[in-house]
Structures are given as structure tokens and as C-alpha cells.
Image (tube, grey):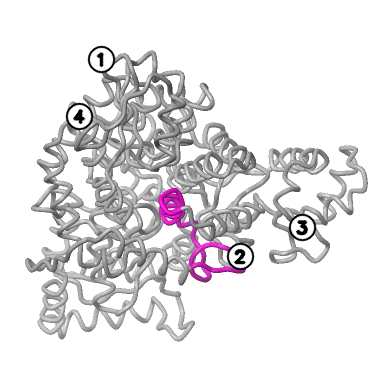
Amino acid sequence: MPNRLIDEQSPYLQQHAHNPVEWYPWGEEAFEKARREEKAIFLSIGYSSCHWCHVMERESFEDEAIAAKLNERFVSIKVDREERPDIDKHFQEIFVTMNGRAGGWPLSVFMTPEKIPFYSATYIPPEPRYGMMGFAELLDVIAEKYAKERETLIEKGKEVLEFIRPKRKIQATKIEQERLEATLLKQIETVYEARYGGFGGAPKFPHASTLLLVMDLWELTAKEELRGILTHTLDTMTLGGLYDPVDGGFCRYSTDEAWLVPHFEKMTYDNALMAEVLLRAWRLTGEERYGELAYETLDFMLERMMREDLFFSASDADTEGEEGKYFIYEYDEALTAFREGGIPEPEAVARRLSITPEGNFEGRSIVRFQNPEDRRDPTLRKALGILKNIRRERAYPFIDRKVQSSWNAMMIRTLFVAGVYEERYRAQAIRSLEALEVKMAAGVSLYHSALMGHPPKVPGFLEDYAWWISALSEGYQATLDERYLIRATELLNEAVRRFYADGRWRIDDGEFRQFADDTDSSYPSSVGVMAHNLQSLRSLVEPIYEKFLYRTLEVHSYDLMRQPISRPTLAGAALRYLRDDLLLKAREERLRPHLAERLDLGYPWLHFRTALTDNYQLCNNRSCFAEEESFEEIRKIVESL
């Protein structure tokens, strides 16, 4: 008999609906039961494509004996961290405070019915392992302590909650352009991993926002070492492994330094952000392969991860209980298919695609090119098509069909960026934005997530507003449709009303009301994105937004000047404010033929703006300082700045 999760929209929660654990969704029913029965709460937070979440489910939550202990002595709550990022952030901060290190998923927290935490962990094995107590034994210990030492546990838990409570004192310092740029250049050089590219060691994430900042700095400083960091990272990252050369698209992260062995789940946000990185790298370097990779990534998302013009959240790492099963190949399997497909010298072709008898992943092979130039080899392209046909006979990994506003807006933004070069992407961006408005908006009230085919229930968070406004701003640059600026202004005004607090921004205005981090994590911080939005609409619509932008930068200035590499999106917004936007103004009919050239003009924050002027005017937020009859003359002026 299913538990209470059967009625939830979240695919992750529904995955647990048939566990023998009597799960509750987050809500008053669970807390009231715990109070009434004087039981502790066991809170488990995860997400649908999380490998270790699935492992803990198989080992513990499907185990009848462990489930019986949970049901008898605790009230168990399941939370989808993608559906409720506010709950996840609150308890991740609790974990860090209790354990002195970063958390992760699954996140396991024991607390009172009043939400006072007293124990936290991530993955817990069912039996003693890795120097950890087994989950079954841990449940006995915690239940015993909760019965006999409850007041002590509550006292310690209150200390944790007091520690994470936001402090009023704000340290501010002057943001200086030269010093900020110098610090960024030094820190980028320090964290850059020279052998395989990227930033930091294994596990290695794409760090799209850092790559975007590298491109900003390269355009501003013309330092060739930045070009080298960009191209080496992208070339190595996309050989195969983290990037999937067969279907297209990026996996979430690589478990090794060489980008070879990924954690095989594919997230919508990674593919949206990395496609934009590749598009911009193509325009800056002139290397066509980056544009081709961007299109492959977008086409994967359109083919596999979209329905009714909206994008699903993620696809799983596991297939039929085995990590990576869909993606990897047996040597004989590939060789037989190559021979049947008429591939000449199939053994040599297999080697060039890193398919070998010994394999590179648990005896089987992850497809990987030997060098970037191989990507265009006609024989290898044909071989990739054969490998894709093999996959068509396999079960595809589970897809989380939850529609999340922020991640959809990221995809729509990137489709608008691509749309000035390929009309089909612009048309898709327009359709997807319209579909998102219909499903996930009610006036200026946005919703965060909903299952495809169901109405939304979870109110929008700061990140939903931030990325929606960003997509609308980019939509204007791709179409010159003023309605996008009007809608962006409406949503920005609502975001300021709901989330802005004297330079700081709250994640939500509901139960926890926590302030958003300015550091980038798996994707850019909402604070950084909102700072860019304020700058865009200050330049394009209304100067009043400057005061909110200035205060946001001021409040975060101390950490920004000390460690800007940890907050690349906000650092980019600060540089943008210090250097100012450039606006190219002209009549719509004069701007429209040049939409595809905007990113080629050599300045990272140049925007088109329609105006009733016969010539082209080049302006910043203080004045217009050039007027020319031809676009080429404007190009020369921008290049000389």
C-alpha cells in the first residue's frame, strides 16, 4: 500500500511512495503527529537524479526492518530539494554548522517537532561501513537519546539555530575596478587546473559562471592567457565523458580530473549554461566547433528533455539500477555494430573513440575523442550515429518531468542567445516563454515547480524571478520586442517588493525567509543574476534601479573584494557596474540586421535599444558620446575603447 507521497507532484517523492517507510511530505500533518506521539522527526532531503539517494533508498528505505524502526519510533518526512530549495538551504546550513564541512545529498536530519535539529548526516549505510555507524543502529541510539536526554538535545539544537541566524552587522569596503580585476586574474590563475583545464580538482564541475567571467575579462583586458584557459578547458571538457558525444549534452560533474568518468545525470541548468558558454566562446574565438557543440547540446535538450515547449528538470545517472548503463559500451558490441554499419577498420575507429577491450569504466567504455579535431572526421561521425542506434534499443534513464521555472528560464535565455544565429532556436524560445507564462505565472506571481500536466502549487522563489527576468532581457536583445522589457520590469518590481531587504535578497518570503548566498554553486547565485538584471533594466528602462544595484554590491563588497572567484556572477556584475553598459541606439529597422553581431563587437555588456533616431548612437548610462551613420563606424569605436 503506498504512503502519503503518492499524492505529491514531485517525481522524486513519488519514487518513494511505495517504500515501507511511512513517509510524509513536508507539512503540518507530519509535525502534528510527531508532537502528539512525542516522536522525533527524521527528515530526508534528496532529488530524483541523485545516485547516493537511490543507494540509500535501496539499502535502507526499502528494508522492512529499518522501515519498521522508522515507523515505530520516528515520523519520517521526505523533501525534494529541487522543489523546496528553501528547506534544503536551511538544513544544509545546519549540517555545516554541526559537522564543520559541506553537506550534500541525501541529507539526513533528526529534529524535534518544533524543527530544532540535533543530529545531521548525509548518506548513512545500513550497517557499519566507512567508519560510520549503521543506520539501523543509529536509529536505536537516537531514539534512546531522544527519550532520555531530550532537553540536552534541544539545548544544543537551539545553539545551532542561533548560530545560523542572520547577523545584522554588514562589513563593507570600496569596490575598486583595478584591484578587483587584478584579484580575479590572480585567483583564476590559482584555481585553474592546467593539465586538463577547469577549476580545482576532482570531482570537477563545469563552472559555467567562472568561464563566462573569464570571457568578460578576456574582452576587457585582451590577456591571451585567458583565451588559453577558456579554449583548453572547453576542448578537454568536451572530448567525451562529462560531455556526451553520442546524444549531446553535459553530465553534472566528472569524478576524475580528466573529465572522463562523469556522474551520468544530466541537469537542465548545466546544459542551458554550458550551451551559452559555448555560443559565446564561438563568437569570441571564431572556432566553429564551439558553436557546433552548443547546437548539439540544445538539440539534445529539445529532443529528449522537452514536452509541450517546456523543459524537464533532469535525467538520472542510473538505468535499471546500474550507474551509467545507458551510456557505456562493450568492446565486442561496438565492434560488431561498426562492421555491420560498414565502418572501415572498425578496431582503429573504436580506439579513436576510446572503446577498448579493457574499457575505461568498470570494464566497459565511455566514448571519448582523442583530440578536438576528430569531432569533424566523417568516419567517426558515422560511428557515433551507429552508437546512438545501439542506445535506441536500451532503456533511457529516468527523467524527472518536473517543470522548474528558474531552469526553464535559463534554457529560454540560451535559446534566445542562439536564436540570433539560428531562427529555429529563437522561435522555440518564444514558444517556450509563452508556455512558461501560461503554466507557471499568475500576473506577477510566479510558481517554482509543477509536474508536467498538473497545476503548480509551490510559490516562486528569488531564483525563479531572477532567471525569468534574465530570459526576458535576453529576449529583447534577440527580438527587439518591447513587451519583454515591460514584463521584465513588472517582475523586477515584484521581486524587489518581495525579496529585497536593504541590499540583501531573501530566497523566499515564506517559512524560513533566509538570505540568498552571493556565492555561485552548481549554477549562478540569484544575488548575482539579480544584480545583472538591475543593471540591464537600469540601462534599458529606468535609472531608479541603480540604487538597488549599488546597495546590493555595497552589502556584499567585503567578501566580493576578498574572494571574488567564489562569486563570479556577482563579480561580473560589479565589473559591469564600474565599467558601465554600452547602449547602441537606433530605429528598429536599423538595429535588426545586426542582432547577430552584438556579441562580436568586443565589449561584454553592449546592448541594443530601439530609439527614434536616424543614426546610430553609442551611449553609456551617463551620456551618448558617439553618433554615426554606419554600423561599421560604430564597430570601430567600440573596438577602440
- Camera-near label (1 vs 3) is 1
**Picture coordinates of residue 592 (x, y %)?**
41, 18
Provide the residue designation for mark 4.
541
Label number found at residue 354: 3
User: Residue 508: x, y in percent?
Assistant: 17, 49
Q: In percent of the image, x 35 and y 16: which residue is there?
A: 588
Residue 76 image offset from top left, x and y in percent: 28, 62
- Specify the amino acid type for callout 3: Ser
C-alpha separation, residue under disc 2 versus residue under disc 3: 17 Å
Q: State which region is magenta.
A: 192-221
The quarter of the image holding the C terminus is top left
Disc nearest the viewer among 4 and 2: 4
Q: Which residue is mark 2?
A: 196
Q: Which of the marked residues, 4 or 2, is nearer the chain's N terminus? A: 2
Answer above or below: position of 97 versus 533: below
Query: Pointers 3 and 4 in contact (CB under 8 A)?
Result: no
Q: Amino acid at mark 2?
A: Tyr
How crowded pointer 3 is (Cα within 10 Å; few <14, some 14-19, many 20+) is rated as: some
Q: Residue at x 61, y 69 (%)?
A: 195
Asked if the residue at tag 1 contacts the one at tag 2, i.e. Cβ–Cβ closer than 8 Å, the answer is no
Label 4 crowd (10 A; few <14 / some 14-19 / many >=20): some
Residue 46 in which image quadrant: bottom left
Q: Is disc 4 placed on a helix, strand or loop? A: loop
1 or 3: tag closer to the N-terminus: 3
The image shows residue 554 at horizontal and vertical percentages of: 16, 58
